[in-house]
Amino acid sequence: MKKGGRKPTRAERKILVVNGLNPLYWLIERNLTTSMHLVHKEVGRRKEIAKNECH
C-alpha cells in the first residue's frame, strides 16, 4: 500500500464529513484554497472535493 497523502486535521475532517466521506479512509494529497485533493487509503482512488465554508 502506497500512501499519497497525510492525515486530515480536525477542520479538514469536518469538511470530509459534510461531503459525505468517512475521514478514517481518506488522506489529504493537496489542500488548495477552493478544493481538496484526496486519496483513499486502501484502494488508492483519487477524488477532488470543493471546500464550502461551514459555520
Image (spheres, rainbow, N blue to C red):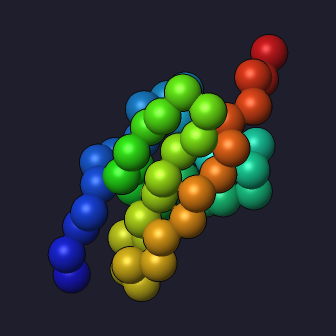
Q: Residue at 76% across / 43% down in the picture?
A: 18
User: Does 32 sit left or right of 54 as displayed?
Assistant: left
Image label count: 0
Can residue 26 be seen here? The reply is yes
Give the x, y percent position of residue 44. 38, 78
Can residue 17 be seen here? The reply is no
Vertical arrangement, residue 53 with respect to residue 50, above or below: above
Vertical arrangement, residue 8 with respect to residue 25, above or below: above
Q: Quadrant of the C terminus?
A: top right
User: Does 25 sit left or right of 49 as displayed?
Assistant: left
Q: Give residue 3's quadrant in the image.
A: bottom left
In the image, farthest residue toward the right: 55
Give the x, y percent position of residue 22. 60, 59
Q: Give residue 47's quadrant in the image.
A: bottom right
Give the x, y percent position of residue 36. 53, 45
Vertical arrangement, residue 41 with respect to residue 9, above or below: below
Q: Give residue 9's quadrant in the image.
A: top left
Give the x, y percent position of residue 8. 42, 41
In the image, farthest residue toward the left: 2
Q: Residue at 29% across / 54% down in the picture?
A: 5
User: Does 21 sit left or right of 12 as displayed?
Assistant: right
Q: Residue at 58% across / 57% down in the picture?
A: 48
48 or 3: nearer the eye?
A: 48
Vertical arrangement, residue 26 with respect to residue 19, above or below: below
Q: Quadrant of the N terminus?
A: bottom left
Q: Residue at 75% across / 23% down in the picture?
A: 53
User: Does 13 sit left or right of 50 as displayed?
Assistant: left
